[in-house]
Image: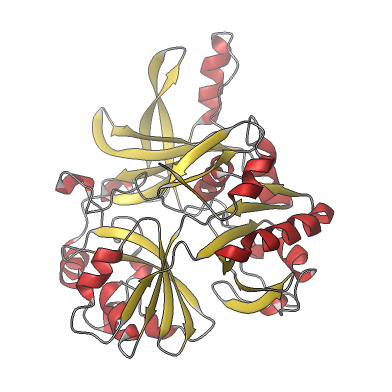
């Protein structure tokens, strides 16, 4: 039976369309209205509030906490200090990604790791012989994401924390409506935004305060459909969609490494040994067989072919999640995994996994899309990621 989040009493009261979905064993909103149009536009023009409590959360403490995390993940965790965070994937011994998430340093020898799926067994297996305590605190901590260009303004009316100076991937501890809240400058939209971490038993009080204050900032509740559009624009991968976790893959061909997914920047080669390092070094030296790229599909031709048949153009405002082959001169050179029409950029965007020789920006591959019940080829141009990267995502108030 699906569990409900600590905020379900609030999200269910706002639900108009009964459009729910499963996430890590929980029931969360896909869209509050019949379509997610207003939710998406609020992400890019005002602000939205999302219930992201299903994120798995692990408390990691002890004298060897840093040593343990640096063995576990590809990033160098010693680069952050109390109040700092980082994004990182982690791999098996073959360098294949198992999951990705964030690490926050809460105090001396104290961290919190988040992930999309349960990882307790993997964490415990890699902690053998170390002075470290690992606790699953997923059900004890509620999390909500406040995203959009007006998110900071809204929060600054609710607390005294110096949010104007909080940098991207930093956090502060403060109070909202008398409740202790950790506010991190993180999110999954590629925009200015924050995530609020709070005791699950007191989460409703914080949600209510944000919603009440949000009336002056055009705040909308938002679900996964709107988030999916935003995260593709932001070039952000999704587990089970853009990569298959190594522990779920049925064949080696279904797995991915950080290098293949364009996460080379998230590998700290000089920090010493970590799980998968040997295999990733070999891949770095020998090259990858596939690379993750952004694609811009020829939407004008897509439009022309529909108009030629007297049809309206079915631009996919709801993101598709499917493996679609990519070709060059009739030979398959890779596949796409996610795609969507971007209302902000006015482009048809997709994520592709292609052979390295076709991965340079400007390269053109073809993708088959449906036009009036028939599959037809369309050009897709390789482009740099992210597609959307506004300066406000990382800006500090008072700086230019």
In this view, the residue farthest toward the top is 310
* Left or right placement of residue 274 versus residue 378 in this view: left
Q: Horizontal and vertical percent for residue 298?
A: 49, 31
Q: Is residue 349 visible?
A: no
Q: Quadrant of the N terminus?
A: top left
Residue at point 80% right, 68% down? 157
Residue at point 52% right, 57% down? 53
Q: How many marks?
A: 0
Q: Horizontal and vertical percent for residue 86?
A: 45, 73
* Vertical position of residue 63 compared to residue 102: above or below: below
- Using the image as rendered, state which of residue 12 and residue 259 is in the foreground: 12
* Left or right placement of residue 222 versus residue 316 in this view: right
Which of the 4 quarters of the picture holds residue 88? bottom left
Which of the 4 quarters of the picture holds residue 103? bottom left
Residue at point 54% right, 8% down? 309
Q: Is residue 371 visible?
A: yes
- Asked which colour scheme the image uses, the reply is secondary structure
* Vertical position of residue 19 compared to residue 176: above or below: above
Q: Quadrant of the C terminus?
A: bottom right
* Left or right placement of residue 359 versus residue 23 in this view: left
Q: Horizontal and vertical percent for residue 159?
A: 75, 74
- Using the image as rendered, state which of residue 144 and residue 330 is in the foreground: 144
* Vertical position of residue 234 compared to residue 251: above or below: below
* Vertical position of residue 387 compared to residue 266: above or below: above
Which of the 4 quarters of the picture holds residue 308? top right
* Left or right placement of residue 40 versus residue 386 in this view: right
Q: Horizontal and vertical percent for residue 391?
A: 64, 64
- Using the image as rendered, state which of residue 2 and residue 28 is in the foreground: 2
């Amino acid at each position: 039976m699906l569990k409900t989040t600590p905020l379900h009493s609030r999200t269910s009261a706002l639900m108009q369309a009964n459009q729910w979905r499963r996430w890590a064993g929980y029931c969360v909103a896909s869209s509050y209205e019949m379509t997610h149009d207003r939710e998406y536009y609020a992400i890019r023009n005002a602000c939205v509030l999302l219930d992201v409590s299903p994120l798995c959360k692990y408390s990691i403490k002890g004298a060897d906490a840093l040593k343990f995390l640096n063995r576990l993940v590809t990033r160098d965790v010693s680069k952050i200090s109390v109040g700092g965070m980082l994004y990182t994937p982690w791999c098996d011994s073959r360098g294949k990604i198992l999951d990705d998430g964030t690490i926050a340093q809460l105090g001396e020898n104290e961290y919190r790791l988040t992930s999309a799926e349960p990882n307790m067994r993997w964490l415990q297996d890699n902690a053998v012989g170390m002075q470290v305590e690992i606790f699953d605190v997923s059900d004890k901590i509620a999390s909500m994401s406040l995203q959009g260009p007006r998110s900071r303004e809204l929060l600054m009316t609710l607390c005294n924390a110096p949010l104007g100076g909080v940098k991207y991937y930093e956090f502060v501890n403060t109070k909202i409506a008398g409740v202790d809240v950790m506010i991190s400058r993180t999110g999954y939209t590629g925009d200015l935004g924050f995530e609020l971490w709070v005791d699950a038993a007191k989460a409703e009080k914080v949600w209510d305060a944000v919603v009440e204050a949000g009336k002056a900032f055009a705040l909308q509740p938002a679900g996964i459909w709107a988030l999916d559009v935003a995260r593709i624009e932001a070039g952000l991968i999704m587990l089970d969609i853009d990569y298959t976790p190594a522990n779920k893959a049925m064949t080696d061909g279904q797995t991915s490494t950080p290098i293949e997914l364009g996460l080379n920047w998230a590998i700290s080669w000089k920090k010493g040994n970590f799980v998968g390092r040997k295999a990733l070094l070999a891949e770095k030296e020998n090259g990858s067989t596939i690379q993750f790229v952004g694609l811009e599909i020829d939407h004008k031709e897509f439009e022309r072919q529909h108009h030629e048949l007297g049809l309206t153009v079915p631009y996919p405002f709801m993101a598709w999640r499917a493996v679609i082959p990519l070709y060059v001169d009739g030979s398959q050179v890779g596949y796409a995994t996610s795609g969507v029409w971007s209302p902000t950029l006015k482009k048809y965007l997709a994520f592709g996994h292609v052979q390295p020789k076709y991965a340079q920006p400007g390269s053109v591959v073809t993708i088959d899309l449906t036009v009036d019940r028939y599959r037809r080829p369309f050009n897709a141009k390789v482009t740099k990621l992210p597609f959307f990267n506004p300066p406000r995502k990382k800006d500090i108030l008072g700086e230019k």
